[in-house]
Image (cartoon, grey):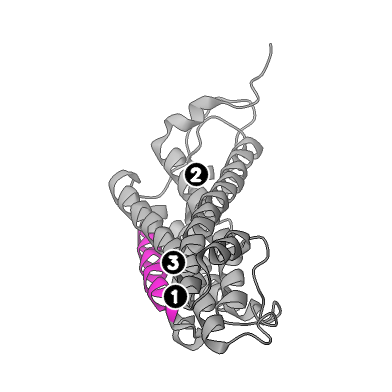
């Protein structure tokens, strides 16, 4: 008798479907931070590619401890408290961070970077593990494959959509900044259109007027600000959906008649 590669009935469990979507969303935000923060550090803050890693270090310093706390909350009270609280903290962190991006100073931003990372860390482990534990009548390997696919899909979709937003927004912002500093509009538009393919690093401004360099840095900061506000909005929506739809309480082992029972697992770290 043929066996299905994917048992679609596992998506009937509302908690499993919601947790899988939330894990994909959270991983998408992590990958987005790694990508956009690195570019922002080099273009707007004038850091080298090596020093740009300091920006990401603050994010993971905020991430690591709450990810362990989230696992403990999952074991004691279930996934809902950690996911609700983590998504709220992350939404606030991204919102406050977005407001500081145009200051062009890591000193003014690092605390908000850590807050955003802490919220993601708090919710990601419980969402991933709870999805596995809630999946009915299937094997551990199959459920893990589904959740990992959701993570990769969420990361790819998030980067594609937010990347398109960044390119479009930066083309508009950079064109305006260059024309305001006396660059002819057709040249400004051409430079802005090619900016995404060859964004200047910290050493590419040699010989250029300081005011013009600052205008380019500020224009890219405004573009990145739009992306981070969107990320804050996505996490706020995750908070609202979690409050409304995520079931309360711990997941209890289910009686299953399948010949190959699926073991329950402890907290899975990202």
User: What residue lies at 70% left-to-right and 77% top-to-bottom?
Assistant: 49
Q: Position of residue 131 (x, y in %)?
A: 50, 44
- Of 267 and 196, nearer the camera is 196
Residue where numbered disc 3 is placed:
119
Quadrant of the snapshot with the N terminus: top right
Q: x, y (%) of residue 63?
A: 53, 70
Q: Which mark is residue 20?
A: 2
Q: Tell me the magenta residue range.
A: 81-102
Q: Secondary structure at mark 3?
A: helix
- For the residues labelled 1 and 2, the Cα–Cα distance comes to 47 Å
Give the left or right position of residue 156, taking residue 17 as reference.
right
Provide the secondary structure element on which disc 1 rests. Answer: helix
Disc 3 residue crowd, few under 14, some 14–19, many 20+, Cα 10 Å: many
Q: Percent from the top left, x then y, of residue 10?
A: 50, 31
Q: Earlier in the sequence, mark 3 or mark 1?
A: 3
Q: Which mark is residue 180?
A: 1
């Amino acid at each position: 008798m043929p066996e299905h590669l994917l048992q679609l009935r596992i998506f009937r469990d509302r908690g499993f479907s919601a947790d899988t979507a939330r894990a994909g969303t959270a991983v998408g935000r992590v990958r987005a931070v790694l990508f956009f923060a690195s570019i922002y550090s080099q273009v707007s803050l004038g850091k080298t590619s090596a020093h740009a890693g300091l920006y990401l270090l603050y994010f993971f310093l905020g991430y690591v401890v709450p990810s362990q706390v989230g696992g403990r909350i999952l074991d004691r009270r279930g996934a809902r408290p950690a996911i609700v609280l983590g998504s709220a903290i992350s939404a606030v962190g991204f919102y406050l961070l977005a407001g500081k991006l145009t200051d062009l100073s890591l000193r003014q931003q690092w605390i908000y970077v850590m807050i955003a990372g802490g919220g993601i860390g708090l919710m990601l482990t419980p969402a991933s593990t709870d999805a596995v534990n809630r999946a009915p009548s299937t094997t551990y390997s199959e459920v893990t494959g589904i959740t990992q696919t959701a993570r990769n899909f969420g990361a790819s979709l998030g980067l594609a959509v937010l990347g398109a937003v960044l390119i479009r927004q930066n083309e508009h912002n950079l064109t305006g900044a260059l024309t305001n500093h006396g660059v002819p509009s057709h040249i400004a538009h051409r430079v802005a259109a090619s900016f995404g393919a060859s964004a200047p690093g910290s050493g590419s401004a040699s010989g250029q007027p300081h005011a013009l360099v600052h205008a380019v840095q500020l224009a890219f900061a405004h573009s990145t600000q739009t992306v981070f506000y969107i990320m804050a909005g996505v996490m706020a929506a995750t908070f609202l959906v979690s409050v409304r739809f995520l079931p309360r309480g711990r997941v209890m082992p289910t009686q299953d008649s399948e010949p190959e029972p699926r073991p329950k697992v402890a907290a899975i770290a990202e």
